[in-house]
Amino acid sequence: MTLSTVESIEGEEGDFTVTVKEAPRYVDMDKCIACGTCAEKCPAKTVDDFNEGLAKRKAIYVPYAQAVPLKYAIDADRCIYFKKGKCKACEKFCPTDAIKFDDTEKTHTLNVGSVIVTAGFQTFDPARLDNYQYAKLKNVITSMELERLLSAGGPTGGHVTRPSDGAEPKKIAWLQCVGSRDLNRCDNEYCSSVCCMYAIKESVIAKEHLGADFEPTIFFMDMRTHGKDFERYYNRAKAQGVRFIRSRVHTIYEIDESGTLTLSYVTEEGERIEETFDMAVLSVGMEASGSAVELAQTLGIELNSHKFVKTDDFTPVAASRPGIYVAGVLQGTKDIPQSVMEASAAACSAGSLLSAARGSKVQEKSFPAEKPLADQEPRVGVFVCNCGINIGGIADVPAVVEYAKGLPNVTHVEENLFSCSQDTQDNMVEVIKEHGLNRIVVAACTPRTHEPLFQETIRNAGLNPYLFDMANIRNQCTWVHSNDKERATEKAKGLVRMSVAKASLLEPIPDMSVDVDKSALVIGGGVAGMTAALNLADQGFPVTLLERSDKLGGAARDVRKSVHGQDVATFLDAAVNRINTHDNITALLNAEITHAGGFVGNFETEVRVNGELQTIQHGAVVIATGGQASTTEEYLYGKHPAVTRWHDLEHEPDMVKEADSVVFIQCVGSRDDERPYCSRICCTASVSQAIWMKEQNPDINVYILYRDMRTYGDREILYKKARELGVIFIRYSLDRKPVVKEAGKGLTVTVFDPVLQKDLEIDADCVNLATAIVPADNTRLAEFYKLPLNEDKFFMEAHAKLRPVDFASDGIFLCGIAHYPKSLDENIAQAQAAAGRAATVLARDVIAISPLVSQVDAEKCIGCGLCEEVCPFGAILLEEVEGKGYRAKNISASCKGCGLCASTCPQEAIDMLHFRQTQILAAIKAVA
Amino acid sequence: MSEFEPKILAFLCNWCAYAGADLAGVSRLQYPSNLRTVRVMCSGRVDPAFIIDAFQEGCDGVLVAG
């Protein structure tokens, strides 16, 4: 439901009544084919918000080319007809009569069991900052505006130009923390978590666009690249010539009429510098949207002091009103991977409650029985679409139809105004039956949007859905050659010829599905594993939870408080108790996996528990093997009793009871050559410990020696609190690390202070090290389930942003520190996400799998194993065949149909269904 | 004699390059029409033999995008 807002939510968890107001679109979604003719003809221009006001759009519009649903809408405030009572150009030119000027606002009442809120955020408006002159100076733009300038689909087609004169900039400055970490000029004291990374990304992309001479400079306070693989990206940007300056620019002014800017700033050494730039980009932060308070009132949920939705560290996606869940920046600043994880976590939480009702509203479609093809000669039917004027207005469709009639195997050809309209579909079914067609080609738009529709149509005519091919004569022909009608027609004929050639060789492919063992295996008994197990068990799925050690709890046992100060031990005890008493959970301690195999819905894992082997059958796997703080040989650790790790101190807080002075050292073993990643949690952990020490004993001297304070999000408040309590922060650099020396019972720490520009010597009763967080040894597990590890030995998810808890292989999911170091609340959200994703497998009795898989000819196979080596999904394996050695075997349920194996096989023993070598070669042959 | 115009065959990955070619259409970008496309489910499907075949069939250039 688009254009909709929630009016009210009545009732309670499990039984909400939601009133939704849907504003009129003035366009019939069923009729609109998004051809764009309406916008072309519309005379009313207005500001294009999606392009940050850098371009114009029409009053009838789609926000951007990839919008979902791709349907036009009329902006009634800008439409001439609505303002003056006449125009209706869109209605006149719309080829499908989709315009509905009499559309009205509708009210819908929904009965739902739970609610997920993902209402997002707004970016900070820098117009109010007088020192940056955003409102006045043309060449001072926001990072969002630069995003549009960098985009190939943006107003300049991806060519970065200066707003003042259209010149190509040679120097751009990015200014970090605009509207973040700032109580002087705005009210956003928190860190926005994402701006450091997006500024680096923009600078790198701008350099790619503008060439080697381009000089990007980023002015920052602390570089916060705390996400997975972000530190590497930062290092790479430095190597590629992005200049990083640790300073806050205080003033921007124009030096001449061309709009060139001067930025004045003070370096760390105290030198005042005035430097000229062509453009300045303000890295604006995130804040709660203006409607957040109203929304919270409507939903009956609480907000925190920053107007983000209030949640608890142990239930990170649950809003204060039971049954309402939240994901994304509405809850607090965060990046895309974290938002996507929370979204899956919210879906999982919402689904737990509703598991009893699962599937109760599903209606299954039925189709007539397929007619056997036997050895019939191909009888190809070709349907050529005009798509209104989108194809027919450019290519000569009747000529294409005539041409198609003369192609080999073609029995019948028709021309349609709109092949996708319901009446054409019905007619197509009749035509197929009438002419006994057994292969169908539709020459129209793109199979990526319309293939499923036509496949369903031919199924209704009793044909197997794979006896179908599409010739893309709109998106890849008339739309891109609209200036040359003759050649567009020529190309359309060529594309139809190739499609018919391929279609003639198509064969029916039966549907494939696998039964699902509706139980899960969760590997790792830490917080992530326990959370995933409990969530799956609560949804009714039997779970086996494996823990290598003799007790549950994992690395969380080394932590006393969560980020927002909640007691971890109490939470752990409750979780362990629930695990031990849950009817659906079998927890196996001292467990070690000795062998594993299988595929989605059907895994088999062999486990040794206390010396005895047992085999577990399961339909899904959640990997939550965790990690721990590494040890170190630096800074006298292990050699002097007063040198600790922060985890040691969590267990023995009394160690600092009598101390007068404590020195923390950050990044011990992180962000260096050996481990070029940030451990993410240590800055916050050290700051929290420092606050605790100061609260216990205000007279204690606490020093934190750091490289960049990475207290992202609202963790920044802890950093601020620590400074207010008198904790002293001293920055050091990797090439000038602190030196710790023994001094009697205590220690002396020497560190170079970049502000004072000299060495400081600090007496310490305790030196507390924030050692790197490292993953468990996952080498064998990765081999068993054929899963990838990254360079730092963390598991590698299917997609960093879009699929952060999935593996490329179906049925296997990932959460916790095994993915990357993260705090308890983040671990819990990710574990709920993994459980939610696993539930999508386990909720089904059978899983339909794409039958477009590889096929091995065992007679040709020589068992070389190249296919197994190249398959990214573990979907083709060597199997011992008696008397023949090894032969490749396809695991259809795991196969994605990519065809790597087929193109690699030296024997041509592997072919791909629906993309057979003969079929592709036929298309190639038809090119000429 | 008319100017030589190469005949180009593109193998496009269904998930990225083919979608990109579709988007070029949605965005109405214009490019020369002497290109024909074959959709594959992954550029990894493109057997070197397909490329040789394309040249043998008279193509002057082959683009594998994925």
Image: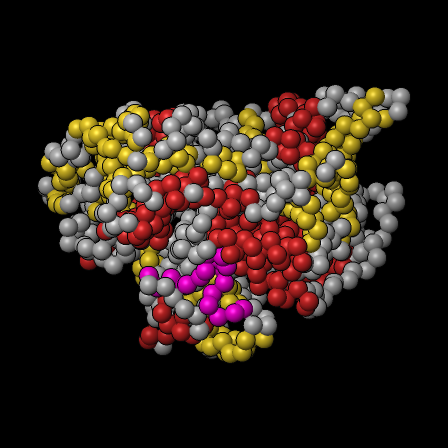
Identify which residue, A129 or A623, lies in the foreground: A623
State the image coordinates of residue A898 (x, y, percent, origin top left): 65, 36
User: Can see residue A547?
Assistant: yes
| Percent of width and height locating residue A246 | 23, 37
Indicate the quadrant containing the C terminus of chain A: top left, top right, bottom left or bottom right: top right
Quadrant for residue A223, please give it: top left
Q: Quadrant of residue A361?
A: bottom right
Main secondary structure along the magenta-highlighted residues? loop
Q: Is residue A263 left or right of residue A227?
A: left
Q: Residue A342 versus residue A409: which sits nearer the camera?
A: A342
Q: Is residue A278 above or below residue A725?
A: above
Residue occupying the point 36% across, 30% down: A235
Q: Nearer the viewer, residue A247 or A760?
A: A760
> Is residue A463 rendered magenta in the image?
no
Residue A796: give x, y in percent of width and height: 55, 37
Residue A134 shown left or right of residue A122 in the figure: left
| Rendered location of residue A431, percent (x, y) | 76, 58
Magenta region, residue range: A306-323
